[in-house]
Image (tube, helix red, strand yellow):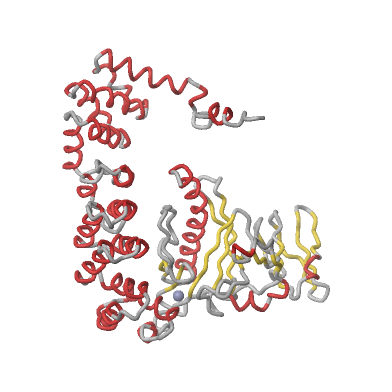
Amino acid sequence: MGFKEDADFARFLSMGVYAADAITQDLERNHGHRIIELERYAKANKVWQTKVKRMRLPDLMCVSCGRRFESKGKTKLEIKLSDSTLPGRSWRDGGMRLDDIFAFARVDMKASPVSVSNLVYVTRQSLEDALGSSKEGNRKSVSEGSEMDRRWPMWTPAYAGEVVAVDDGLRKVRVTKGTGTYLYGSGSRWAAFHTLAVGTAFEAGQPVAFCFRMADSVACAGDGSWSWQQDLLSTDEDIRFPAIKAARFLGAEPVEDILIGIADDESNDWRLRLEAHASLAPTRPASVAALLVLAECAGSTDEVRMEAVFSLSEIDTEEAAEALHSVASSIEPAVPEEVRAAAAWGLGTGARKAPAKLMRLVNDPSRLIATHAAAVMPSDLPQECLDELLNWLHTDDLRRAATAAHLLAERDLVAELVNALQTAPEDVRKLIVLALGDTSREAVAGLLSGLDPESRAGIYTLWAKNDDWLRQPDTDGILEALKLQTLRR
Ligand SMILES: [Zn+2]
């Protein structure tokens, strides 16, 4: 996939990220949970080509009570889950126990900032009870594993109002609508009929009547309600994995020996072993070293390398940052470019930011690594990095100079660029003018008088882009795109 397709896909993934984040906030603030990502990257939208086949588990978990949450965000609020006839692939699989919670939300990506609303919490038990009312969506081909959607019907008026009366016998609900009322009667087709209580006010888009029982309480049962240390000893991977993951947040020291045992036992699934190291690594350099070996050694598969790199990115220690830099700059042919790029990414977006290390990667001969490093360079650069960037503007290395010009312009460091213009080599001066053309007009305007006439003329020409209606964000490339569609034989 090209980087433009990746960006489109990332936008699609963002919807799930916003939903998972809003659900996390609600569960923590209003219900007392302490939520972690049970599935790594549940709350990130970075697209990678190397797919890591993770344990089939929900995306979120509370480390206090051990309850698991599967979050779903869509443009339209629907109680819809993907389902399949293949063993282990039905809607109820994936590590959801009967009292675990499916959390649904409506995500408005067009709002600015993006808004998430109408949260609905349902236990798996409630969805099981209402299975008779659920409907299968279109089934895809058998070759796709008979994938389909399963939907549990409900009624969500598009207006705000209040519940006036509920007739459980006839399965009808009357609500206020503007100055009048509206009677909803389609619930008679469901096996069970649940509604908001009489007198309850509702917002536009909030479910009023539904074929399932909403979770009465999603409150956290509190510390001590989950015997996670015992779960570490379970023979069931679905039980054991969350406990290993939680250990990092609950204190790995008391269970260090158990975790080391899990990490060292070759009969365990690789994901359990890697996660045990990930939980030990913040306080145990030997586990950082073990993760580095997994990322770099010749015997690892690409998904193991990626997961090891992602784990190292979560650790806020100097050893972990060193390890990431080692992977990112690896000359080992067995280490794929994308694994190196992921390590660079971790140095900018991970637990420990390392701009000085990223500086050594932004001019890597591999375009993939150099661009990943440059994209995640912190916006606030330490002085020594700035000094180095300015040095690059005074070399004959045009690749280096271009990197520096971009990184400075992105940060609106206009005065620095203008100063460099006076002294930079001829070819580099042109790159600096180009970069100044990308910065905000207001930032540059005040400094124009100090420039030589040629550079000034160059910047004015670049600004003319704003006056060209075919070079605006919504029209740039439009003619080429239309010409591609003139084929007619
Ligand atoms: Zn909890």
User: Can the viewer see residue 174 in this picture?
Assistant: yes
Q: Quadrant of residue 422?
A: top left
Relative to 157, say whether 380 is above or below.
above
Relative to 444, say whether 125 is above or below.
below
38 to the left or right of 305: right
Q: Nearer the viewer, residue 31 or 7?
A: 7
Q: Position of residue 399 (x, y in %)?
A: 25, 33
231 to the left or right of 363: right
205 to the left or right of 167: left
User: Can the viewer see residue 80 in this picture?
Assistant: no
Q: Position of residue 3 (x, y in %)?
A: 43, 43
Ligand 1, by image quadrant, is bottom left
Relative to 434, say whether 272 is above or below.
below
Q: Nearer the viewer, residue 279 or 200?
A: 279
Q: Nearer the viewer, residue 213 or 13?
A: 13
Q: Position of residue 30 (x, y in %)?
A: 49, 68
Task: Kindly identify the residue that appears in the image at 24 percent across and 41 percent down.
Answer: 363
242 to the left or right of 382: right
User: Where's the C terminus, which quadrant?
Assistant: top right
Task: Kindly identify the residue that appears in the image at 51 percent across and 29 percent down.
Answer: 477
Residue farthest front in this picture? 489
Residue farthest top in this picture? 453
